[in-house]
Amino acid sequence: MARKPTKKAVLNVTIDESLADEVRLAATLANTTISSVVEQALAEQLKWERIRRDGLKAIDEYYQEHGYPTEEEMAEAAAQVAEEERLIDEALAAMEAERRRRYRTRDKTPDSSADTRRGRDTAPEVTPVARRAKGTA
């Protein structure tokens, strides 16, 4: 069954030149038209805007039916989120420590010739800048 062609509208928009360059590049890389790239991007953005509006409407309807959270409930929820974030940070730190342990263990093995050939006799030093970039300083 053939798809019925949709009627197209012409819109005149003004956008930043750097964004226009990105749109042109995207069209070239996808071997399509600028209009197609813009249409797809707008459709995706509008889809997420509808989802967001629907979500906010659902939250408002819930609050209208069940009441808004009290300050005490909000504080409890904030504490729960803080605890979850702490647990995530703890897990990430443990994973990083394990990664470092494995890296050091690998370098101490008798056959570390592959690392030596690449000029790496030891694990790379983590500089304060690298730690700050990772948020660990």
Image: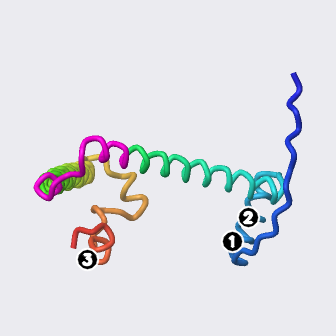
Q: Residue at left 55%, top 53%? A: 49
106 or 93, which is in the foreground?
93
Instruction: Label 2: state its secondary structure.
Output: helix
Q: Over which residues does the magenta segment extend?
A: 59-74
Question: What kind of secondary structure does the magenta stretch mostly adopt?
Answer: helix
Which residue does the numbered mark 2 point to in the structure image?
Answer: 23
Q: Is residue 20 left or right of residue 76?
A: right
Q: Which amino acid, mark 1?
A: Leu
Which numbered marker is on residue 128?
A: 3
Q: Which amino acid, mark 2?
A: Val
Q: CA distance from mark 2 to mark 1?
A: 6 Å
50 or 21, which is in the foreground?
50
Q: CA distance from mark 2 to mark 3?
A: 38 Å
Instruction: Label 1: state its secondary structure.
Output: helix
Q: Which amino acid, mark 3?
A: Pro
Q: Residue at left 26%, top 49%? A: 106
